[in-house]
Image (tube, grey):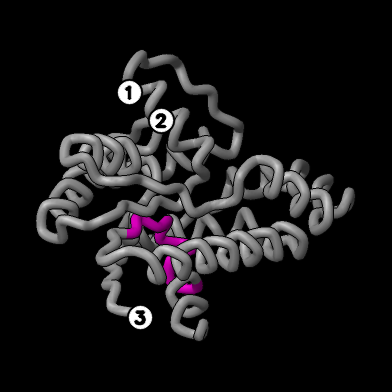
């Protein structure tokens, strides 16, 4: 890959213990750049939070996700995996880049892919998902099962595929310019992002 090495760390959003995994990975890889599966706008938001913490609002789905995830340990927002990445990179003066869609790009993709019917079903099926049991043995397994349940509707599923394509393209740009990269990617997106990256010239 043009002389650049990239190390993926699949992360689970919200789980507090993920911070230690990120610190350990950063120490062992000493990357030239840190990539995270959030937008650059969200990176700036994390930095604002780190400098002056504020209350983070959650949607109904996020609250339910946190309730299930709490089986595996303490849960915290903003995601500890990304807060730890920010802290580790800032300590060492390492560049940080968000490789997910910015607000404008995400909004355009959402409007193009998610139909009114998809949105209606997504809203009304909350109570069904609320009653669902997720038989996961690990937090990573739960995150993947949760993603499949919440994003199973056609438009939402296509939106996640677009996000994966976008992240793979951004990582490919990094590979062309940098020496080493540590990529913190949501576990539910990571497998497809890696596959797409391998398929690129």
Q: Nearer the viewer, mark 3 or mark 2?
A: 3
Give the extent of the magenta segment: 183-192
Judge the density around disc 3: few (<14), some (14-19), many (≥20) Cα neighbours within 10 Å.
few
- Identity of the residue drawn at 31% across and 36% down: 83
User: Which quarter of the figure has residue 180?
Assistant: bottom left
Residue 99 placed where, x, y %?
49, 54
Residue positioned 27% across, 72% down in the render: 5
Mark toward the start of the polypeptide (3 vs 2): 3
Q: Residue 129: horizontal and vertical position, in percent?
A: 61, 49
179 on left or right of 107: left
Instruction: Count how many numbered circles sit on residues in the image.
Output: 3
Q: Is residue 189 magenta?
A: yes
N-terminal label among 3 and 1: 3
Mark 2 neighbour class, 10 Å CA radius: few under 14, some 14 to 19, many 20 or more: some
Res 50 label: 1
Given contact means CB atoms under 8 Å apart, are the residues at marks 3 and 2 in contact? no
Mark 3 and mark 1: span between their CA atoms? 34 Å
Q: How many other residues sit within 10 Å of disc 1, few (<14), some (14-19) or many (≥20)?
A: some
Which of the 4 quarters of the picture holds residue 85? top left
Q: Which mark is residue 46?
A: 2
Q: Tell me the mark number nearer the camera, choosing from 3 and 1.
A: 3
- At a point 77% along the width and 49% down the height, the residue shown is 108
Tell me the SS state at disc 2: helix
Q: Is residue 192 left or right of residue 51?
A: right
Position of residue 63 measured from the top left corner of the image (x, y, whole percent): 51, 33
Marks 3 and 2, Cα distance to the nearest angstrom?
A: 30 Å
Instruction: Identify the residue under disc 3.
Output: 1
Real-space Cα separation, disc 1 to disc 2, in angstroms: 6 Å
């Amino acid at each position: 890959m043009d002389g650049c090495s990239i190390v993926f760390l699949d992360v689970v959003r919200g789980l507090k213990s993920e911070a230690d995994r990120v610190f350990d990975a950063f120490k062992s890889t000493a990357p030239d750049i840190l990539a995270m599966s959030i937008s650059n706008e969200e990176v700036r938001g994390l930095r604002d939070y780190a400098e002056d913490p504020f209350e983070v609002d959650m949607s109904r789905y996020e609250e339910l996700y946190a309730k299930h995830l709490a089986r595996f340990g303490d849960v915290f927002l903003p995601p500890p995996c990304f807060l730890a990445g920010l802290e580790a990179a800032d300590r060492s003066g390492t560049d940080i880049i968000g490789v997910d869609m910015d607000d404008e790009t995400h909004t355009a993709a959402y409007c193009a892919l998610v139909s009114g019917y998809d949105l209606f079903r997504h809203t009304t099926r909350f109570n069904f998902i609320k009653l669902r049991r997720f038989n996961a043995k690990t937090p990573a397994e739960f995150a993947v099962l949760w993603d499949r349940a919440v994003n199973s509707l056609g438009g939402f599923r296509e939106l996640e595929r677009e996000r994966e394509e976008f992240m793979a393209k951004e990582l490919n740009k990094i590979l062309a310019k940098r020496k080493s990269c540590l990529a913190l990617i949501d576990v539910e997106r990571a497998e497809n992002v890696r596959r797409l990256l391998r398929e690129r010239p």
